Image: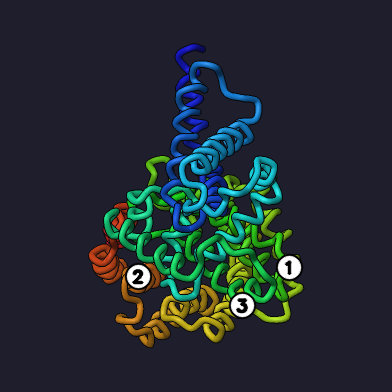
Amino acid sequence: MKDSQPHTARTLVDHLFREEAGKMTAILIRLFGLGNAELADDIVQETFITAMKKWPLKGVPENPSAWLMKVAKNKALNVVKRERMIREKSSSIPGINKDEAAIDNMFDQQEVKDTQLSMLFTCCYPEIKEREQLILILKILGGFSNAEIGSALLIEPEAVKKAFYRARVKIKNHYTELPELNREETQRRADTVLKAIYLLFNEGYKTSFADDLINADLCYTALRLAHLMTSITLEDSGRTHALLALMYFQSARFPARSGEQAEVLDLKDQDRSKWNRDLINKGFNHLMKSRNSKELSRYHLESTIASAHVQARSFAETDWKLICSCYKKLMMVEPSALIELNYVVALSYLYGAEFGLKKIESIEDSEIKAKQYFLWAAKAEMNVRLGRFGLAKSYYQVACDHAQSSFDKNYLRRKMEECDLNNLSQN
């Protein structure tokens, strides 16, 4: 037991860091001001170092999250008291004049939620590029390191550091303190925030560059932030619920997306009994709530597509007619070559692989860009279904040349081997 206690404590601290660090950072930035973000980071780091030192020796507290918040609050109070003694009149800390009761109130559960929302909207400041918004969210609200963010977004850690600094300067030039959310601002920027959360989940769910099949931390951070969005009143809250439905449906399939050798499994090869039914039920709960929307968004359509997959008892029973209908509408709402490719793949299951191959020729290779290997893999798969294994193998090879992650490359090599075996059996 003694040997396992330190390991258990360290594992729990690592888990809680991802969950609690963002909450602490948001509150501390609210207290110290946007110009003192480094001070907030230091206190968060010190809080978790304290936990790492004490928990293995004294045991994990009954409520670890509350313990961490209390330590962070006490450290913040010490900083405020010190600042008052040293330079009360010239201090750059906005919260220096707050009394202990006011600071204590900032760590209240509802205040923590409101502060995170305010921080989330601030990270999505319109003059900041989408990639910089993601970096701010991951760094401040997700507790991710520069190296982790770089791995997720295909950026060098030093480039992450510079982008974070640039984005923070832009915000500091506009805001001195963390702004309070107002109804008008919330309505105007809600779509930007939802898009950032959507992109964040997608980076975790399937990145073409990382060497992990799924970055679950990114996905669960996106889920946590999307749930925060349900606590504010929006003219169209259905979009938030549609996004949550999509993320729950996708997350439900995590356990079945890889095989015993950590290989990527196609949707049709996945063991559907491994899909998480609780997450699927949560997805349908949010899907029902999303129907109150006045307008159809990409989140409504994508969550409906995902629902069709998780409802099907087998791949053969998939409702491809519904999926094709959704993709057709999605192309009008959010036109892109990748969505068009997905539409063509769906059509190929509805009308046949030969029909799909004819339709796929209309998609420009250049428009797929970094995801170009999807185009060649789709062509290969359709040829496999038509029994043209030699041609399919050549397409899989081109797809492999364009793929970036080791998971994708290994998956495509395995497909080429299957083509060789099928060729042998034909001859």
Residue at 50% across / 78% down in the picture? 343
* Residue 399 % position (x, y): 29, 67
Q: Residues within 10 Å of mark 3 (few under 14, many from 20)?
A: few
Q: Earlier in the sequence, mark 3 or mark 1?
A: 3
Q: Is residue 342 visible?
A: yes
Q: Is residue 119 left or right of residue 285?
A: left
Q: Which residue is mark 2?
A: 371
Camera-nearest label, 3 or 2: 3
Viewer-nearest residue: 154 or 43: 43
- Of the residues under marks 3 and 2, which one precedes in the sequence? 3
Q: Residues within 10 Å of mark 1 (few under 14, many from 20)?
A: few
Mark 3 lies on residue: 188
- As helix, strand or loop, the secondary structure at mark 3 comes to helix
The residue drawn where x is 48% and y is 28% is 50
Whole-Å distance between the Cαs marked 3 and 2? Answer: 31 Å
Amino acid at the residue labelled 1: Thr
Kindly state the secondary structure of the residue where label 1 is placed: loop
Q: Quadrant of residue 191?
A: bottom right
Q: Examine the rendering and report whether any part of residue 386 can be seen.
A: no
Give percent across and percent down for residue 33: 51, 56
- x 54%, y 39%: residue: 81
Residue 257, image x, y percentages: 47, 51
